Image: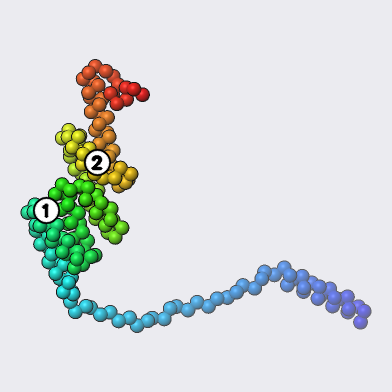
Amino acid sequence: MSKTSPFLAALVFLSGMTFARAEPTATVREYRPLMAKSVTMVVAGGASADAKKGAAFTSEGWARFDAKEWDAAMDKFLSALEKDATDHSAAEGLIMSLHRSGDHATTSRLAAEIAAIMPGVKDILVRTITAEVRALVGRGEIETAGALLAHFPKDDIAYGEARGLLVSAKVIGAELDADKAGSTAPASLAGN
């Protein structure tokens, strides 16, 4: 028995070493596809009366806008927003009517307030202002472009492109004035 005992001990020892070297058992997970669920879709019978009235006010507002009747257009767009506060077209029309009427300070404030709910409306205003500044600068009306931009927040980066156009036009104008005067440095940079 003493001869088998060391043999058994070696066998047990080697078996233990084999198990020690083996990688841990992988956990097997069973994945089951999701079961199909029953979904019922119902088409609404029709738009609500307020939504229909709001759409009619919006349509009338755009008609007044096209006729350049800014006050009447603003009234219609406000009425449309009273019926449906999420009417993006009415909000856009209100902002653009205010802008076209020349009330730029109110336009700026209202666009900032509406931007939290409908950011696209402010984006349309910013693109319009940028296009107008570009046109004014192109015609040499730099003071008019500056007066227009004065109503919009200086720290709002959305108007950065329009402000950049204005600054570039002022620098180029100063360089042209300096060239006419016989100087080589722009008047705005002469002191630096």
Foreground of the two, 79 or 38:
79
Quarter holding residue 69: bottom left
Q: Amino acid at mark 1?
A: Trp
- In the displayed structure image, the side of residue 107 where residue 6 appears, left or right: right
Which residue is denoted by mark 1 in the rendering? 70
Residue at 61 percent across and 72 percent down: it is 26
Does the rendering let one see residue 31?
A: yes
Residue at 25 percent across and 51 percent down: it is 109
Badge number at residue 150: 2
Q: Position of residue 49 (x, y in %)?
A: 16, 74
In the rendered image, the residue lying farthest to the left is 67
Q: Position of residue 122 (x, y in %)?
A: 25, 53
Residue at 32 percent across and 22 percent down: it is 190
Residue at 30 percent across and 81 percent down: it is 40
- In the displayed structure image, the side of residue 32 where residue 44 appears, left or right: left
N-terminal of the pair, mark 2 or mark 1, is 1
Cα distance in 3D space between marks 2 and 1: 22 Å
Q: Amino acid at mark 2?
A: Ala
Q: Position of residue 151 (x, y in %)?
A: 24, 44
